[in-house]
Image (cartoon, grey):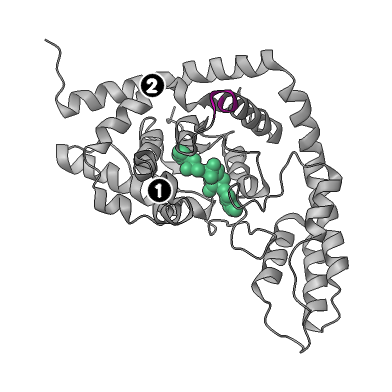
Amino acid sequence: MAEKEIVLSGIRPTGNLHLGNYFGAVKNFIKMQHDTNAYFFIADYHSLTTHPTPGDLHGNVKQVLAEYLATGLDPELATIYVQSDLPETAELYLLLNMNAYIGELERTTSFKDKVRKQPENVNAGLLTYPVLMAADILIHKAKKVPVGKDQEQNLEMARKFAKRFNRIYNVEYFDEPIPYNFGEELVKVPGLDGSGKMGKSEGNGLYLIDDEKTIRKKVMKAKTDAGPTEPNSEKPQEIVNLFTLANIVSKPETVKFFNEAYSDCSIRYGDFKKQLAEDIVQFTMPIRERILSISADDAYLSKVVKMGAEKARESAVKTLKEVREIIGFRHF
Ligand code: TYM
C-alpha cells in the first residue's frame, strides 16, 4: 500500500481560536485528515516567547485543544499532540540552530514586526522562532502544511533549513515542506478594525467561543466609511475587509447582492453588517456549544493528548535517530 502523505499544522496557545485561524488553517487541515497522515499540535514551546504564567500556560493549552476538537479535528484520524510532549522537537531545534544564521533570522518580517511592537521583550526565542517551526515540521518529515498567508515566510525558512541540512551533509534526507491550501491562494482573514489581519495580538478577533451578542456587537462596530457616492467606485480597505469576510461566511448570492448595492451606491452598511453578523453566528454557534461541552471533559482531553503524544513520538524518535546518525553522533 502506498504511504500516506504527511501533513502537519499547529497553533500557538496564546488566546482563543478566531475565524482567521479557522479559515486560514484548520478548515483545510480538517479536509485533509481523512486521507493523509495528519499531525496537529499545540505550539506551547512557541508561546513562551510571550512569557505566560505557569498557571495560564496549562489553561491555554487545554482551551485551544478543546476548541480545535470542537471544530472537527478527529483524534482517531489525526495525531493531535502538545509540542512540549515531544522533546525530540527541542533537540532537532538545537541541531538546526547551528546552521541558521543570525542575519537571515533578523531579516524575517515577523521578527522585525515584534522588534517594533514589543521592544521590551526581544528574546532569542523570537529570533529563532522559524527554526523551532522548521523542527516541528521536519521532525515528522511533513510535506504539506495547511497555514494562512501570515506563515508563508516561516515555511520558506523551513524549506531553506531542510535544503541546507541536505547540502551540508550531502544527503537527500528532508523534503521541502510546502504551505498548502488546495491549490488556491493562501488565505488572510482581515480584522474588523480596518487593519489587514485578524489576530490575537491585534485584539480584533471574532472568536469561535464568542456568544451571539458579542459577535453581533463586534460586527456592528466594524469600521466603515461614509459610503460610496459615485457608481462603481473603488472600495476602501475597511469595506474590502467586510466583503472578504462575507465571501468566507455568507452565501454567494448575499455577497452579490451587497456588491451590486455598493456599485449603485444604494448599500446600507447597517444592513450589510446585520447580515454578515447573522451568517457568522450561524456558523459559530454549533462550534461554540461543542467547545463548552468538550472543555468540561478533562478525562477526554487527557486521553486525546496521551494518545497523540504516543503516536507523534514514533515518527519523531525515528527522525531524530536518523538525523543524529547523519550528523555523526556515534555510540562508544
Ligand atoms: P498562529 O497560532 O498565529 O495561528 C494558527 C494558524 O492560523 C493561521 N492564521 C490565519 N490565517 C488566515 N488569516 C488570519 N487572519 C490568520 N491568523 C492566523 C496561521 O497561518 C496559522 O496557520 N507559528 C504558528 C504556529 C506553528 C506552526 C508550526 C504552524 C508553530 N509551528 C508548524 C504550522 C507548522 C503560529 O504562530 O500560528
State the residue at coordinates (37%, 27%). 89
Q: How many marks?
A: 2
Q: Which residue is mark 1?
A: 155
Tell me the crowding category of disc 1: few under 14, some 14 to 19, or many 20 or more residues within 10 angstroms, Cα based: many
Secondary structure under tag 2 reads: helix
Residue that sits furthest to the front in the current view: 120
Q: Which residues are magenta?
A: 53-57
State the residue at coordinates (84%, 76%). 267
In the rendered image, the quadrant that contains the N terminus is: top left
Q: Where is residue 82 drawn, in percent x and y?
A: 51, 25
Q: Where is residue 241 drawn, in percent x and y?
A: 67, 65
Q: Which residue is mark 2?
A: 87
The residue at label 1 has a CB less than 8 Å from ligand 1:
yes
Q: Is residue 239 visible?
A: yes
Left or right placement of residue 37 versus residue 157 in this view = right
Compared to residue 303, the image places residue 218 above or below, namely below
Tell me the crowding category of disc 2: few under 14, some 14 to 19, or many 20 or more residues within 10 angstroms, Cα based: few
